[in-house]
Image (cartoon, rainbow, N blue to C red):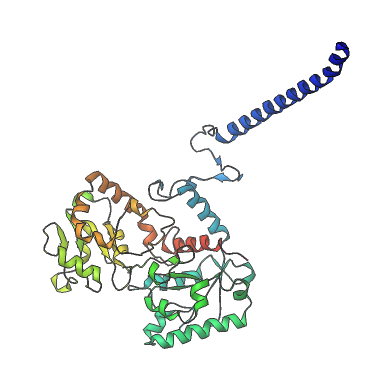
């Protein structure tokens, strides 16, 4: 009887043993698979002799030297959030990005062409000119990633148009495009953009809420507290061109003044800055603009001999003084709340600038003096690397302000859902 029981139990034991062996085998195979995959994707690439081409992982494309370093040989790692991603995306943008410009509007009035390429609002003019003549324009709207609305509020301002009439002109123009073409209605304007450097352009578009809410706004006054949306809109660098003097840089030994500012007191922060620091012996703070009667280009030359240049917001959060500081090699000290700095999603501003809150104005001198000489030299060297991004050219030059704005637009177009 016991023999029969043993025979009955034996198949059950064999089944359990067989199942355990199968599970163990599966576990071992799984472990080997994960180990192989881990080694496959984590093992460093083999060393390649200098000058030999390298393949970008997963792309099959040969990595060129310019994919990792700039044309001038300087590495970009210190100033970019992600230099490799920037390089690869930039190359993709250059190859593929296309913009359709609506042909409507008389160039002799407020449309198509820039007002001028000089002065505080030159950024708008350079963009209008370069987008029409550059590689990114397409005459086929079906090939376009974005659509440019070529209306210039700066031209309206130059012709003495009132704010009220600007609003009506903008509204009528955009509504005519909506009714005439099918492209706006595909995304409710999400793949459309307009460019304005003067703050009147921002106000002139407020009569058309869909334009403000849905379209990409490339503006020089990107303030969070007046409806600027960072992931949708683009901060346009305000650059006063042409520059009066050559670019500064690699001249730290000549910079003996701790900090410099001179300008109109047309904002609360500027009034406080002048009142607190105008009599200081280490900070060169002027209570007003420097008169030309004091000498030729005295204002610009003070940038050359200053370590830090204070950039408080004026009537808006932005100031052309930031680009001036960068051009002349003076570390910009941003003293403006709610300011989405140009190319902020690409450049790490804290690597070449000092970014403060307006409330820090009372401790300004102490904050600047805490920055060691070595830290200052690092900031200065990084500043020289990014000077080209804040320079407009016509025709545009790779990595200049125009290309950087186009890159920001390229990034924005990827967020649009059709």
The front one of 203 and 250 is: 203
Circle count: 0
The front one of 180 and 50 is: 180
The front one of 59 and 319 is: 319
Q: Does 122 sit left or right of 6 as displayed?
A: left
**Position above or below: 86 against 157:** above
Image spot of residue 395 (x, y percent): 45, 66
Q: Does 33 sit left or right of 283 as displayed?
A: right
| Residue drawn at (50%, 50%) of the image | 85
Image spot of residue 37 (x, y percent): 62, 34
The front one of 147 and 14 is: 14
Q: Does 400 sit left or right of 260 as displayed?
A: right
Image spot of residue 305 (x, y percent): 19, 57
Quadrant of res 244: bottom left
Quadrant of res 347: bottom left
Q: Residue furthest front?
A: 1
| Residue drawn at (11%, 58%) of the image | 281
Q: Is residue 321 visible?
A: yes
Image spot of residue 109 (x, y percent): 46, 85
**Position above or below: 15 against 168:** above
Image quarter in which the N terminus is found: top right
Q: Does 370 sit left or right of 70 as displayed?
A: left
Image quarter in which the C terminus is found: bottom right
Q: Is residue 305 visible?
A: no
């Amino acid at each position: 009887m016991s023999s029969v029981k043993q025979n009955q139990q034996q198949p059950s034991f064999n089944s359990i043993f067989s199942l355990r062996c199968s599970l163990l085998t599966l576990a071992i195979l799984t472990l080997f698979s994960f180990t192989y995959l881990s080694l496959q994707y984590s093992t460093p690439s083999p060393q390649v002799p200098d000058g030999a081409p390298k393949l970008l992982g997963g792309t099959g494309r040969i990595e060129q030297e310019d994919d990792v370093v700039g044309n001038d040989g300087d590495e970009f790692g210190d100033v970019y959030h992600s230099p490799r991603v920037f390089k690869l995306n930039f190359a993709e943008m250059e190859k593929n990005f296309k913009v359709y410009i609506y042909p409507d509007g008389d160039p002799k009035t407020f449309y198509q062409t820039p007002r001028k390429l000089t002065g505080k609002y030159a950024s708008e003019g350079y963009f209008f000119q370069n987008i029409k003549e550059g590689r990114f324009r397409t005459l086929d709207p079906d090939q376009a990633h974005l659509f440019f609305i070529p209306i210039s509020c700066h031209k309206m301002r130059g012709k003495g148009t009132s704010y009220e009439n600007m609003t009506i002109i903008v509204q009528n123009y955009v509504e005519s495009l909506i009714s005439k073409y099918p492209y706006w209605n595909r995304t409710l304007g999400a793949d459309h953009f307009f460019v304005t450097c003067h703050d009147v352009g921002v106000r002139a578009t407020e009569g058309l809420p869909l334009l403000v809410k849905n379209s990409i706004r490339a503006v020089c006054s990107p303030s969070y507290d007046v409806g600027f949306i960072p992931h949708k809109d683009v901060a346009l660098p305000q650059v006063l061109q042409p520059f009066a003097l050559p670019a500064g840089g690699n001249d730290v030994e000549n910079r003996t003044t701790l900090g410099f500012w001179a300008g109109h007191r047309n904002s609360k922060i500027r009034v406080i800055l002048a009142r607190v620091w105008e009599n200081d012996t280490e900070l060169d703070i002027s209570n007003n603009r420097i008169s030309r009667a004091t000498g030729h280009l005295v204002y610009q030359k003070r940038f050359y001999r200053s370590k830090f240049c204070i950039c408080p917001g004026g009537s808006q959060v932005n100031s052309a003084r930031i680009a001036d500081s960068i051009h002349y090699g003076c570390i910009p000290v941003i003293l403006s709340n709610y300011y989405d700095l140009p190319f902020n999603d690409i450049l790490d501003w804290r690597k070449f600038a000092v970014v403060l809150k307006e409330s820090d104005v009372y401790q300004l001198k102490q904050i600047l003096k805490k920055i060691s000489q070595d830290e200052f030299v690092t900031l200065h060297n990084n500043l020289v690397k990014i000077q080209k991004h804040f320079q407009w050219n016509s025709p545009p030059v790779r990595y200049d302000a125009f290309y950087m704005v186009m890159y920001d637009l390229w990034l924005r177009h990827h967020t649009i859902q059709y």
